[in-house]
Image (cartoon, helix red, strand yellow):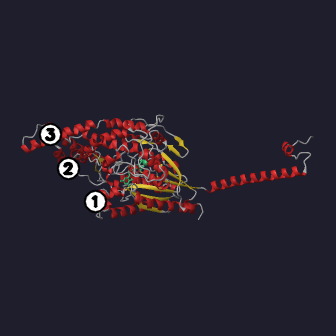
Amino acid sequence: MPVPVDPLEEVLKPPPEESPEERLLRLQREEQARQVSAAIDATIKAERNACRKKRIVRLLLLGQSESGKSTTLRQFQRLYTPTAFREERILWRSVIQLNIVRSIRTILDALLTSSTTSLHSSFRSRSRSVSRNPPPLPDVLGVAEEEIPSSSSPRHHPHRSGATIIDSDGDVDSDLDLNQSPASASRSTLATRHRHRHSDTQMHLDRDCSPPRQNNNYYHYHKSSYQRQHIRALKSRLSPIRDIEQRLIGQLVPPDEEEATHLGNGNLGGNGIHYTTSTSMVVGSPGRGDIAQGEVFVRPTTMWRGALARARVTHPAFFGDGGSASSDSSGESTGSGGVGSLEYSDDIQETLNALCADMIQLWEDPNVRGVLKRQKIKLEEGSGFFLNDLKRVTSPKFIPSDDDVLKARLKTVGVAEYRFEMEVPMSRDTGTEWRIVDVGGSRSQVITWVPFFDDVDAIIFLAPISSFDQVLTEDRTVNRLEDSVLLWKAVCSNKLLANVDLVLFLNKCDILDHKLRSGIRLSKYVRSYADRENNLDTVSKYMRSKFGAIQREHSPIPRKFYAFCTSVTDTATTAGIIASVRDMVIRQYLRQSKFL
Ligand SMILES: Nc1nc2c(ncn2[C@@H]2O[C@H](COP(=O)(O)OP(=O)(O)OP(=O)(O)O)[C@@H](O)[C@H]2O)c(=O)[nH]1
Ligand SMILES: [Mg+2]
């Protein structure tokens, strides 16, 4: 049988009549080639080792809607990838425009349903002050198990024996008698509604009556008639606001984005998993609860940023190398490179600028404030509040500052994983890739969290403790603090997360402080708080101990737990807290990976 010829051997065979010089040259060439090949092998091996050693730290942000998860993520980005954060700031201008437009629309809608501009607001407030005196909510922190049964899934908020009753304005009117039968509860609801209808009828009758006969009333009548006209004129001049809102929504959503961005139009969007970029993944779709809210959302992907980038403003000062582009009172950037010209003329910003004086007049009008007060609309405490900064934020050359970006509100729907390496890594952090998972927090979104519970190094859970006197937007029968407590219990007791360290941010402490100082008593809503001092320090210590106790009681195995009182919109205080969290997470990661 013939022996097969090795084709390589044939090719590499030395020439048949090789001289000694030729042989030496050939051997030198072969040695060089061997060295090059060895170097390539070594590089590949080193890269493979580096990859194997690369640390990936996964941090999950959990908490109810508007608890501050995306704001916390933005704080991480601001601190650790400042260049990218700076470059994206201009894209937030549209979000801020939308926030302004929505605040103004809220006021206009409140005026529509109100008799504010009439003479009879004083009567109205009198009648309302008699008819309502909200009793306390169920004591969510009393941790009485029969009141708040624990839930194994964050989705389920078990039915409680006491019902929180909401009146027609969405105020929490009662609950309170936990022994009350459903029948008597519904009776009291009806009674409350009847009272309101009655006072509304009274108002209606008053509105239709002739001008008062007494002289001073005659003066007030003319004054209020003037005010009515004034507000009517303002409303009419501000009518473009609704059109601007639609255009902004169109701008925030790319034309090929088939999913709804305006919850409330009945489009549920798509289900399933979408891989949108190499660094982010979106799961799930908005649910019915979201639709009720009518809040604009975008999926937490780069898509909306891509859409806005088309309308991007080139601004040398802003995109320059490292100048801290803050805004001065005129709204213009004070970055190191000076103010550049706007390449893209943003006509929405120009329109808002033209409407600025009217918007300020509307917001500052005492009658309008009266309407908002009576309807218990507290825009200042809400998300994305920019009405006290109208002049600055509607200025044509307005570039959002860091604080503006942190204050802007854009609801998250779905789950997104943001990957980054710190621009200036700390010693232990070198070579670490951070993956921070930001989730949509509204109730219908909670189901999308679970697939992300695998392989998590730490969780930051945000509980907005200022919300003790508020109800969920998606379910106005549930107190927001109670909802946070239930979610916290569910997260603590989840077996998939048993080995994960928990970091608790008792968030929105700035708003809490403001509320307590304004005289709102926590004990009215949390009975177990009893007669403790009604100040931030005592309240935050109390909350910390209650959430800590729940964690100890419900964790399947003991684990590390850290709690911070935070106002994540505040850059100064949050920087230190986030640095501590980062160190803690890295330490834990190294311990678990046996690097330490
Ligand atoms: N005053 C104040 N505002 C805050 C604080 N934390 C968050 N906010 C604001 O609250 C709003 C909601 O915050 P987000 O970070 O969007 O809330 P979220 O948890 O991501 O909400 P979803 O996306 O709906 O799940 C934003 O306008 C924030 O600027 C805080 O500590 N103090
Ligand atoms: Mg969010």
Disc on the earlier residue, 3 or 1 = 3
Which element is circle 3 on? helix
> What count of labels does the image hold?
3
- Which residue sits at x=10%, y=43%? 219
Which element is circle 2 on? helix
Q: Are marks 3 and 1 in contact (CB under 8 Å)?
A: no
- Tell me if 458 is positioned left or right of 467 in this view: right
Amino acid carrying label 2: it is Ser
Residue topped by disc 2:
129
Image quarter of residue 223? top left
Residue topped by disc 1:
517
Which element is circle 1 on? helix
Amino acid carrying label 3: it is Asp
The foreground one among 350 and 270 is 350
Cβ of mark 2 under 8 Å from ligand 1: the answer is no
Residue topped by disc 3:
206
